[in-house]
Every structure is written in C-alpha cells, then in structure tokens.
Amino acid sequence: MITSIFSKSKPINFVIVFFIMMLAFTKANIMLFKESMSITTFFEQTGLFLLCCFIILTFNFIVSKNSLTNNNHYQILLFGLFFLMIPQTTIGENILFSNIFVLFGLRRTLSLRNPTRNKSKLFDAAIWFAIAALFYFWAILFFVLIFSALLLYTDNRIKNWIIPFAGLATVFIIATSVSIVLYDDFFKVFHFTTGVSYNYTNYDTAQFLIAITILLSFGIWASFFYVKISNNKKKALRPSFKLIFIALLIAFVTTILAPQKDGSEFLFLFAPLSIVITNYIENIEEKWFKEGFLILLIVASLVLLVL
C-alpha cells in the first residue's frame, strides 16, 4: 500500500509528508505552545513550519532535476519521517536557514555536470555555502563539495578553482559592510559559534538513542548498496551520485562537530541520507520486503513521537 502511493509522483504525497512534518513540529513546540503562546509566537512558528515545507519542496526539486532517484516520492517520505524521528530539527532556526542555503549551494554544484556557464555556477555555489555558514559556522564544510565537483568533472582550469574563493570573499565583504553600517562594528554580524563539542550526554535519552541507531544502521546498510548502484549509473550521472555521498559524509562530520548537541544538527543529514536510502529501496526486488522496510520506518517514527 505504501509503495503504491509513493512509487509515483503525486500531489497527495506532499500533503501526507506535510502532515507528518506538522506532527513533528507540534511535538517539538508543544511546551512553547502551552507556556508562551501569543500572536507573535504563532506567526514566528508558522514561519518556521513554512520554512520546513519549503526545504522539502526544494529538496524534491533538486532530486527530480538531477535524476538522483527514479520518478517517485520515497525521498520526501523519508525526509518527513526523519523530521518525525528527531523533531528537534524543526526548531533550530539558524540551522533551518543554514540548511536551505546548503541545498541552494548543492543545487548549483550538481548543475556543473552541464558544462555551460560553469563560472557563474561556481560563484553562486560558493555564495550560498558562505551564507549558510553565517547562520551555522560548520556549514562551511560543504564548501568541499565545490572542489569535489571540480575533481569529479576533471576541471583543471586554475581560474575555476579560484572562483569559489571569490564568492566566499564577496559574502565576507558584504557581511562586514552590513555589520559596520548597522552596528558600527566590523564583526558584530558574525554571531555564530565556531567551537566544537564532543559532549553527547544530551543524546542519552530513549528517543535520541533509537533515532540515531535507526539513522546510522539504515544509512550504513544503504550506503554499501548506494556505492554499487552509483557505479552502475550512466557515466554522465555518476559524479552527481558521488557528490551526494560526499555531502552525506560532510553532514556526518558537521553533526559530530556541532557545538550544541540539541538534535537540530541532524538536519544536515536528512537530504543526502534520504537520497541514499531511496536508491536502496528502489533496487529492492521483493515487494513485500520493500513494503516491510517502509512500514518499519513509519512505525519506528510514530513510536518515537510518543516517547
């Protein structure tokens, strides 16, 4: 039943996923709603929920535009279920904004497989990743994707390797100028935390332990198949699939380095992990096993919702 619904691209699928996301958002904000509900809070939280919806739509656009999965909606279902497993990802305002800019940067990086206007794409990707870092410092690690793309597409032109640094410098100069105008200070606008924390005591709860175990076990299992699947893709598509896997590794490192372990840092994992697991699901031949795989994820997500 689940496979028959999400195996095709249908508008109803977005309605289902947005409902799942609303459950996650309500779970994460239930205490806020009880304690300090006001018109201002209502509009702020509505804005964050709409931002979550926009992230889903942007993610789906990137996947379909670059043929990263077949013509289905398993990837947005998985993204929604991941929100449900770790609802704290819906309330990290800075990380939500950072994530959407990372997705913008990923879109421009993946578009490098089309060799037209590459200089513009490199500059845009660098700008998006730099803006993402303004909201969450460790998002700067996704800058590695640009150089990975240049290596995968065997672009040896020195000028193209310099362009990303020009994009980074552009954001720094503009941000510094805004900081001077608004705060009369060079670096006031750079309010992010650059520290690193290896204190994982916040994860010592049933919800986090189960969710992290599911994400890691399913992710590692699917990754083995993803690497094999990537090598069997058309030559023109292989670099895109490899870039997604690199993005997954970067997101994992970003999660480990997060200065505040409150759960919101897992958001960076959701997009690449959804693509990796979707490719695994697509290649499951036994329909009963595919159905059982998805049911297990859904049941686990609903159980975590009530913990």
Image (cartoon, grey):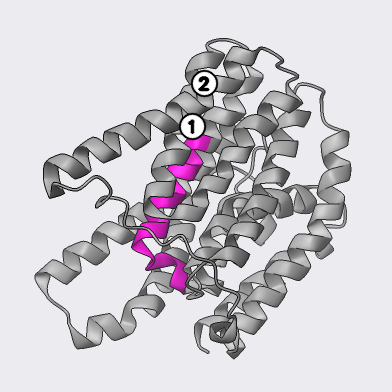
Residue 87 at x, y percent in the picture: 47, 72
Residue 137 at x, y percent in the picture: 45, 53
Q: Earlier in the sequence, mark 2 or mark 1?
A: 1
Residue 140, compared with residue 177, is above or below; it is: below
Q: Amino acid at mark 2?
A: Ile
Residue 238 at x, y percent in the picture: 78, 30
Q: Are marks 2 and 1 in contact (CB under 8 Å)?
A: yes
Residue 200, compared with residue 105, is above or below; it is: below
Residue 29 at x, y percent in the picture: 33, 77
Q: Residue at x 42, y 51 (%)?
A: 98
Provide the major secondary structure of the magenta segment.
helix
Q: Is residue 89 located in the magenta-colored stretch of the structure?
A: yes
Q: Is residue 12 located in the magenta-colored stretch of the structure?
A: no
Q: Which mark is on residue 126?
A: 1
- Magenta part of the protein: which range? 88-105
Kindly identify which residue carries mark 2: 163
Crowdedness near tag 2: few (<14), some (14–19) or many (≥20) residues, C-alpha within 10 Å: some
Q: How many marks?
A: 2
Q: Residue at x 24, y 81 (%)?
A: 33
Residue 37, compared with residue 64, is above or below; it is: below
Q: Nearer the viewer, residue 20 or 12?
A: 20
Residue 303 in sight here: no
Residue 307, compared with residue 65, is above or below; it is: below
For the N terminus, which image quadrant? Answer: bottom right
Q: Nearer the viewer, residue 43 or 70?
A: 43
99 with respect to 206 (left or right)? left
Q: Amino acid at mark 1?
A: Ala
Q: CA distance from mark 2 to mark 1?
A: 8 Å
Q: Splitting the image into 4 quarters, where does residue 220 fall? A: bottom right
Q: Splitting the image into 4 quarters, where does residue 78 fall? A: bottom right
Q: Splitting the image into 4 quarters, where does residue 35 fall? A: bottom left
Q: Residue at x 83, y 64 (%)?
A: 289
